[in-house]
Amino acid sequence: MAELGAACIRFALLIAIAGFGVAIHAGLSRRPDWTRVAERSVLVVAVSVAIAIATLFTAFATGDFRLSYVAAHSALSMATPYRLAALWGGQAGSLLLWLFILCMYSSACVLANREKNRGLMAWVVAVLLANALFFLVLLTFVTDPFETFPPERAMSDGAGLNPLLQHPVMMIHPLMLYTGLVGFAVPFAFAFAALISGQLGSTWFQTTRRWTLFPWLFLSIGIMLGGRWAYEVLGWGGYWAWDPVENASFMPWLPATAYLHSVMIQEKRDMLKTWNLLLIGLTYTLCLFGTFLTRSGIVQSVHAFAQTPIFTSVFLGYVAFTAIAFLTALLARRRGLRSPQRLESVVSREAGFLLNNWVFIAILMVVFTGTLFPVFSESIGERTVLGPKYFQMLAGPLALVLLLLTGVGPLIAWRRATAASLRRQFRWPAVATLATAAGVVALVRSQLTPYALGAWSLGGFVTATIVQEYVRAIRSRVRHGETPLQALFALWRKSQQRYGGYIVHLGAVLVLMGATGSVLNEERLENVKPGAEIRMHNLRFDYLTANALPAQHYGGAVARLALYRDDQPLAVMTPEKRMYWLEQQPASIPSVYSTLQEDVYVVLTAIEKDGSATFKIYRNPLVNWIWIGGAVFVFGTLLVMWPHPTRSPARRA
Amino acid sequence: MSKGVQVAGGATIVALLLAWYALANLETGASFSYYKSLAEFQAAQQTETGKPVRVHGYVSLGSIERDVAAREVRFTVQNAPPHKASADAGPAMPVIFASLETPDLFKDGAEVVLEGRLRGGSPPAFVADKLLAKCPSKFEGQGPATADGGARG
């Protein structure tokens, strides 16, 4: 079986090389028949890679420990779903997953464009195959998932998977994240193809809008699930630590989001062509770079260079090559990209979008600098780490500016806003902002920080602007004889980009407002004997007992605490302290009691020798709103993306 | 003055304000921390007493002692992993971690990063207010699992 997988990768490599050559020839000679041949080679590569990944899945499912990759990342004691998910538990497997998803996207792109964009497709295929080629080379020569042990070293069982990764969310989170990161290859390929072929009209971005929204949605879901997993598994009471791995997935999201906004200016006003191309190039480069960061261990130490010199230099070289090739093409075409339009007023929606873009890029620069600071500083002297405080301090105020723009943008006119229109638009939202601010001050009082006050008040402002937009639009339709519900669905169908976009904004506002709840977090470390109680705020915990966990591939203890609020019984909390035998690794599984108002989060830190237990208890207000906001965000994105066959794509705005 | 210049001017002011805000806060040193190996730290011990630092080392076998009454954990760190006989472990340094909240990966032989300062006296002890333990190296390509961070695959 292992031989089949390895053979498929090598076969795909040969076909990809041939297909790449054919695509270049088709692009230069503008021969449609050669373009078809190149497109077919994409499908052949995809089938071949699909067989390879199926082989590796089979090896994991059947426990084929002749493969060193399977032996290093799974064990017979693990449940089958986790054994399958162990495929992306290490470097070689996750690169194979990357390649597989890239092949699926490439095939879908080829099949969807059989009749469209014929002039671009040869170059699109060339770019997509070039990317596939890189991963095929990597999987063949540098990090081979099908490497086998010599027979004398065959193993009867594997080493197991990091217990922290044995969690339901961890089975889908990497899939979502990769579906997001890899998907930007398609818009990137279209942008690159437009630059090479010189067809710089509106075709490429109209085609790629949905191809951008789709991976963007999955990247957003992936980032949220990562937070959810950290919250449920890592047991430190939080969901986002500005950890390099988290930042690696967040960085491409920023220019991608900026692009989704600024592309609207290109649609309406034919401006910012160069900028939009730059954003797409930046997004994809950061997707590759993020994969490199998480897979090379470079942020943990620059010594990763010394440990895996081939992998790091090949991968970095590829990222640099991608960026430089794209920039060169962009520079070569700069004349054709000049816009006839100029910005007419600083009080206009264009200016708002432009500012929005700059803020996204500023946040990106903050995150990029902070993430790579250990690497920069270690290479010039002392290794210095920038903690979460650095990120919060800089990204926080920038997020407030974004929040303000989210509310202001839709209210000001394109081209030039008048004073009268501004008054009409801002009256009620301004009232709502002040009301929210007053409410927050009255409720929170002492712990309030300027940032939190700003975030919640602006959240109220944005929500009010969205409600106002909906109320006005629905009212005007109701005047023409529709029921309010009919009117709502008509808005979602006929102006899906605008009214779906508002729902996305609402989701983002909820996430930000929920995250701001962290300024009110409380935590306590307590050591108690069974029968004793812990009080915190209006909460009371009665520590009842601790029992041994039923023995399986892990053992350990589970503590039981009765939770009361104002002496009303709420729940029995059961935090666990597990020991995974095979991996020799302990894991604390927190117990969470979650309401819309706050989460109560209990970690069993240790059962002490004297029979007492040490608990870490967190009270995290508003955390649930982050997940609710995430769901609203996804719903809004689906509204924007939903295909409505009755409308012609040309009219979609 | 063209609109482009107006917008650029506005953006510059915002950028300058942010830079000023960042510098003013960063200078307090709240976000910076230096990262030294135990050997480097011990070599510079005289000058380092009392200063906030991050030190990297390995927990000596059998040294972990949880003192529930005093609400602290005491252990010693050394320069090289204890299970590697060949490596030079060097003189061990006693550590007092002023909390009972140890991360899951903290155990005998674990690779740790301590945040805190050296307390003078004899023998001098390192008082840590933060303790991060790293993943064992067999999980390639994964970040440090910490009391306040994440281990990711």
Image (cartoon, helix red, strand yellow):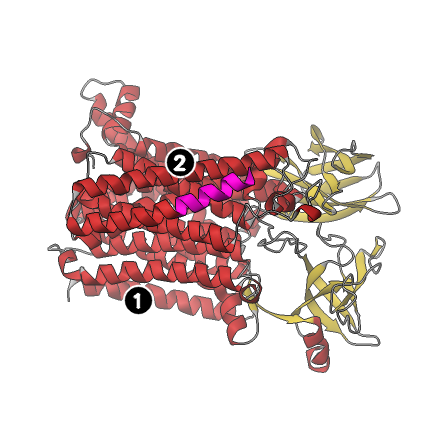
Residue assigned mark 2: A47
Question: Separation of disc 1 and disc 2 at Cα?
Answer: 52 Å
Q: Is residue A348 left or right of residue A253?
A: left
- For the point 48% across and 48% down, which residue is it? A95
Which structural element holds mark 1?
helix
Q: Which residues are magenta?
A: A1-13
Expressed as whole percent of the image width and height from the top left, the position of residue A128 reads: 32, 47
For the point 28% across and 58% down, which residue is it? Answer: A326
Magenta segment's dominant SS is: helix
Could you tell me residue A548's position as x and y percent?
Answer: 81, 35
Tag 2: Cα neighbours inside 10 Å, few (<14), some, or many (≥20)? some
The amino acid on which the numbered mark 2 sits, given as a three-letter code, is Val
Protein chain holding label 1: B
Residue A492 place in picture, x, y as percent: 28, 28
Tag 1: residue type?
A: Thr
Q: Is residue A297 magenta?
A: no
Q: Which residue is mark 1?
A: B12
Chain under callout 2: A
In the current view of this chain or complex, which residue is farthest to the bottom? B46
Establish if A300 lies above or below B104: below
Q: Is residue A345 visible?
A: yes
Q: Which residue shows up at 25% across the image and 53% down it? A: A277
**Residue A279 picture quarter:** bottom left
Work out which residue is located at the far left of the displayed protein and give it: A340
Q: Position of residue A481 (x, y in %)?
A: 20, 17
Closer to the camera in the image, A395 or A469? A395
